[in-house]
Amino acid sequence: MENVNFEDIGLVDYKQAWDYQEKVFEVVLQSKNNPSEGKKRHHLIFCEHPHVYTLGKSGQGSNLLISDEMLKRINATYYHINRGGDITYHGPGQLVAYPILNLEALNLTLKEYVHKLEEVVIAYLATQGVTASRLDGATGVWLDKGIAGRERKICAIGVRASRFVTMHGFAFNVNTDLNYFSYINPCGFVDKGVTSLQKEMGKPIDMQEVMAGVKQQFANVFGFTWA
C-alpha cells in the first residue's frame, strides 16, 4: 500500500492550481532522491475551477471556436498548457483530480497509469448504476461505446509525466454546465458528445458524496492509504 497526501482545495483559479501543482511536483521529485521523505512521495489534489478552457501541448488552437471577446462575455479564461491531449473545459460542478505521483514507486508505466485513472471513474460510476467504458483511440471515460451518434464523454483525461512524476489528471463532469462545451471541439472530436452525472441521473448530484466515492476508488484501484 502506498501512502498518499490528499487535499481538497475547493473552487480555485486554474492558474493558481497549476502553480500549486508545480510546487508539489518539485517536492515529489526531490523526495525521489531522499528515501527518508517517503511521506512526500505521492499527492492527490481535488478541486473545481471557474470557467476555463485548456489546450494541451499538441492540441489545435482551432478547436476553440470562439473569440477572445466571446471568452470574456461568457466569463471564461483560456490557457495553453503542458499536458497531453487537446482542448477541454473546466468549470463549477466538475470534479478535477490532480494526482502527483511517483510512477517508479508505483511500478507503473504511463500507459498503465492512464488506464488506472480511467478505471477509477468507471468503477465509481458503476456504484451509481451508470455503465461506462474506455473508447479505443480516445482517452477518457465514455458512455454508450460503439453506438453511433450516442457516444459521449463524461470524464476527460490529460496528463504530463516528467522523470516519472505525474501532473494534471482528469476532469469528471458531475453537475457541469454542458453548454460551455458547445464553444469547443471537446478533446478535438467533432462527432462525439459530452455528458454529466447530473444529466445521466436526471437530478443534481451531491459533490461531497462524489468526492468521497471517487477518493475511495483511488484507494481501491491504486492501493492507496491516506496520510
Image (cartoon, grey):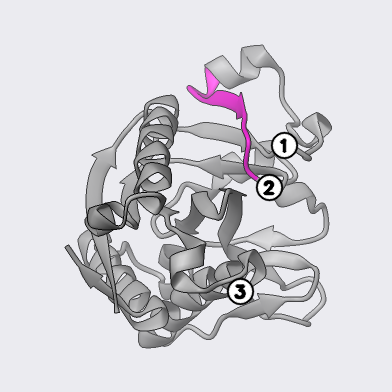
Q: Which residue is mark 3?
A: 112
Q: Nearer the viewer, mark 1 or mark 3?
A: 3
Residue 151 magenta-highlighted: no
Identify the image quadrant of the N terminus: bottom left
Q: Is residue 181 above or below residue 130?
A: above
| Residue 28: percent from left, percent from top | 37, 47
Say left or right for 214 vs 37: right
Q: Secondary structure at mark 2?
A: loop
Identify the image quadrant of the C terminus: bottom left
Q: Residue at x 57, y 49 (%)?
A: 163
Q: Which residue is mark 2?
A: 84
What amino acid is labelled 2 in the image?
A: Gly
Q: CA distance from mark 2 to mark 3?
A: 15 Å
**What span is in magenta?**
73-83
Q: Which residue is mark 1?
A: 57
Say left or right for 195 vs 130: right
| Residue 4: percent from left, percent from top | 27, 62
Say left or right for 14 vs 57: left
Residue 82 magenta-highlighted: yes
Badge 3: residue crowd in 10 Å (few <14, some 14–19, many ≥20): few
Q: Is residue 2 above or below residue 74?
A: below
Q: Is residue 213 above or below residue 86?
A: below
